[in-house]
């Protein structure tokens, strides 16, 4: 199991809940604006966090945390992620999954075992533009399958788009919106530049007025749109 990080508690990452955070290494994308580049490009520089140790930590916190956020990297790439989820559920803790949605087979298994309480699924741009996020071809149709699975699952979820100039334009908002038409919640996040990125785009974040306009545009497609970081 390639667990590469553990963070005690956070109020921010699991809506309405106090959670611990677990990070898996590796990803099947290399988004230029990735905020966890070392977890994606060089995860083996971090030692694997032993499962038993992690479970003992979670158990000791279980009286004051509600759940665990499983993030990355892309956690669904590790087949052992589901082993961790089963163990977390055995501790009677809730699970939020952060995912890029490119492994619908794994998502389907997690849903069928009722391991997930909340899913944040990233929609980075128009699905047919996903080739711009990786050096190898990307099966963007897999994303469509994950979207469908999630919308039919009955599990709480958010679709999440970081509005990176150039990757997310008004046309992309329409294309993404069309792919999730009728969904519950779509979160539009402000892009924040950081030094540690895979290939930091030489762009300034959009002025907030652009985000407000995107929010209004996005409302045509889903029940609720939320702005984050604006
Ligand atoms: S932003 Fe997410 S999907 Fe993209 S490379 Fe980073 S971890 Fe992977």
Image: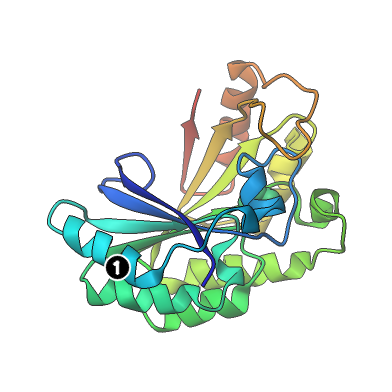
Q: Residue at x 52, y 79 (%)?
A: 108
Query: Which residue is more in the foreground, 185 or 99?
Result: 99
- Picture mark count: 1
Residue drawn at point x = 32 percent, y = 52 percent: 20
> Is residue 177 visible in this depiction of the protein?
no
Q: Looking at the image, can residue 167 be seen?
A: yes
Q: Is 50 above or below relative to 164?
A: below
**Image point 20% across, 70% down: which residue?**
92
Position in image of residue 21 (x %, y %)? 39, 52
Q: Is 199 or 186 nearer to us in this picture? A: 199
Residue on which the image places disc 1: 55
Quadrant housing residue 43: bottom right
- Rendered location of residue 109, percent (x, y): 50, 82
> Could you say which is closer to the camera, residue 2 or residue 138?
2
Q: Position of residue 163 (x, y in %)?
A: 65, 34
User: In the image, is 176 to the left or to the right of 18?
Assistant: right
Secondary structure under tag 1 reads helix
Residue 146 sits in quarter: bottom right
Residue 145 vs 68, above or below: the answer is below
Q: Is residue 178 left or right of residue 138?
A: left
């Amino acid at each position: 199991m390639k667990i590469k990080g553990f963070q005690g508690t956070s109020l921010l990452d699991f809506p309405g809940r106090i959670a611990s955070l677990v990070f898996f290494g590796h990803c099947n994308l290399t988004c230029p604006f990735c905020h966890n580049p070392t977890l994606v490009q060089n995860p083996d520089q971090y030692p694997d966090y032993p499962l038993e140790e992690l479970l003992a930590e979670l158990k000791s916190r279980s009286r004051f945390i509600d759940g665990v956020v499983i993030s990355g990297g892309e956690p669904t790439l590790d087949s052992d992620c589901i082993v961790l989820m089963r163990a977390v559920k055995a501790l009677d803790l809730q699970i939020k999954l952060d995912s890029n949605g490119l492994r619908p087979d794994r998502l389907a298994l997690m849903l069928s075992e009722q391991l997930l309480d909340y899913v944040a699924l990233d929609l980075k741009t128009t699905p047919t533009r996903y080739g711009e996020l990786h050096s190898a071809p990307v099966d963007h149709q897999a994303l469509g399958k994950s979207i469908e699975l999630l919308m039919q699952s009955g599990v709480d979820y958010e679709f999440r788009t970081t509005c990176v100039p150039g990757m997310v334009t008004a046309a992309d908002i329409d294309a993404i919106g069309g792919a999730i038409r009728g969904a519950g919640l779509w979160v539009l996040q402000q892009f924040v530049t950081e030094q540690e990125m895979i290939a930091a785009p030489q762009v300034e974040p959009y002025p907030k007025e652009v985000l407000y306009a995107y929010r209004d545009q996005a409302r045509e497609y889903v029940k609720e749109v939320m702005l984050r970081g604006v």
